[in-house]
Image (cartoon, rainbow, N blue to C red):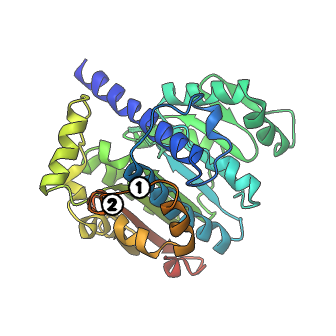
Amino acid sequence: TDSDTADEAVRATCDDATTCKRFASSKSYWKDPYIQYFVRSVGERKAPEINRGYYARVQGVNHLLDAFIRKAECDCQVVNLGAGLDTTFWRLKDENLMPRKFFEVDFPTIVARKIHNIKTKPPLSKPIIETHSTDSLLLDSHCLDSDRYCIVGADLRDISSMDEKLKKFQLNPELPTLFLSECVLVYMTPSQSSNLLHWAAETFHTAMFINYEQVNMSDRFGQVMIENLQRRQCTLAGVEACQSVDSQKERFLKTGWEQADALDMMTVYSILPQDDVARIERLEFLDEKELLQQLLQHYSICWATKDKLNLGLSQLAF
Ligand code: SAM
């Protein structure tokens, strides 16, 4: 059906993210020793502005994620929504920043691929086994559940079934919880993503949500981005919520979050640690600075909090 084709096109975006991250990390924009186990070859060259864009995305998201985990002193959960083949679990383990439990949700076919890689690659499976205390590790083709890491197949548009699956694997509403969605909400209609944000806000009293995605999509450059995706049968169903950084904040404030902030990625790029930015700018020559600016102005990070436990989550920023 049309909707199967549309979902398949959305699932294919997972490979874009992974191959771009694989390429940029192979060029030393940042270190990711695990992504090679999800995409074997480095693949074709990506333009320098794409690599710098991914650098800003990964550093920006990691900055807020790590700050939340530190505030909660690791006594928290992370839920990565539409996680794809993301490697954050292994990074947090290596950096001694593991939350009590790390959850991931994606479509069952993507989850099956991820679990297959984990099963067959010891560098991926070892850290999961090491952090598991009993012999009850659940690892079948569609679902992984260990003490510290859980991957479930579910559709983010079907909240009640997703909620049920996560609770079955001990997602705990009483613990401070960090939600992450990286280029995910934009593929759902505004009402579907609102339902998801609302579910998170009403289920967890102390939480933070980090959302990275397209923004400022009404201008000419934004239209070209939309057309390029449409050529691959991929519809940005949620683009209405991506009109501006203010509309990004608004959707959280309307769905039960206490406080929300958003920055476009050009701003994030200009406030990331500048010695490291200088390092990555030496990696590849970039002639057209304006191209990078335009690209980064069309993505944003939005973060929202609620903080019944008074951890000081509203102070988290760049
Ligand atoms: N967050 C990952 C990253 O940044 O590397 C993957 C990003 S990829 C662009 C979007 C991901 O969201 C895909 O893995 C896709 O399968 C997932 N996704 C989109 N809509 C979804 C839905 N309704 N239910 C579950 N997963 C979904």
The image position of residue 174, as x and y in percent, is 62, 63
Q: Residue 296 carries which label?
A: 2
- Say which amino acid is labelled 1: Gly
Dot 2 and dot 1 residues touching (CB under 8 Å)? yes
User: Taking 2 as reference, is 217 above or below it?
Assistant: below
Residue at the spot 20% in from the left edge and 60% down from the top edge: 243
Instruction: Compare residues 118 and 288 and report the one nearer the observer.
Output: 288
Q: In this view, does 197 lie to the left or right of 279?
A: left
| Ligand 1 closer than 8 Å to label 1 CB | no
The image position of residue 249, as x and y in percent, is 31, 69
Q: Which quarter is ligand 1 in?
A: top left
Residue at the spot 37% in from the left edge and 53% down from the top edge: 49
Query: Disc 2 to disc 1, how far (Cα)?
Result: 6 Å
Q: How many labels does the image show?
A: 2
Instruction: Compare residues 118 and 152 and report the one nearer the observer.
Output: 118
- Say which amino acid is labelled 2: Leu
**Mark 2 burial class by Cα count in 10 Å: few <14, some 14-19, many 20+:** many
Q: What element carries label 2?
A: helix
Q: What element carries label 1?
A: helix
User: In the rendered structure, which disc, 2 or 1, sits on the residue that comes first in sequence?
Assistant: 1
Q: In this view, does 134 lie to the left or right of 155?
A: right
State which quarter of the image contains the N terminus.
top left
The image position of residue 207, as x and y in percent, is 53, 66
On the image, which quarter does residue 226 sit in? top left
User: Does any portion of residue 200 appear in the rendered image?
Assistant: no
The image position of residue 173, as x and y in percent, is 58, 58
User: Does any portion of residue 17 appear in the rendered image?
Assistant: yes
What residue does disc 1 label?
Answer: 53
Instruction: Compare residues 314 and 13 and report the one nearer the observer.
Output: 13
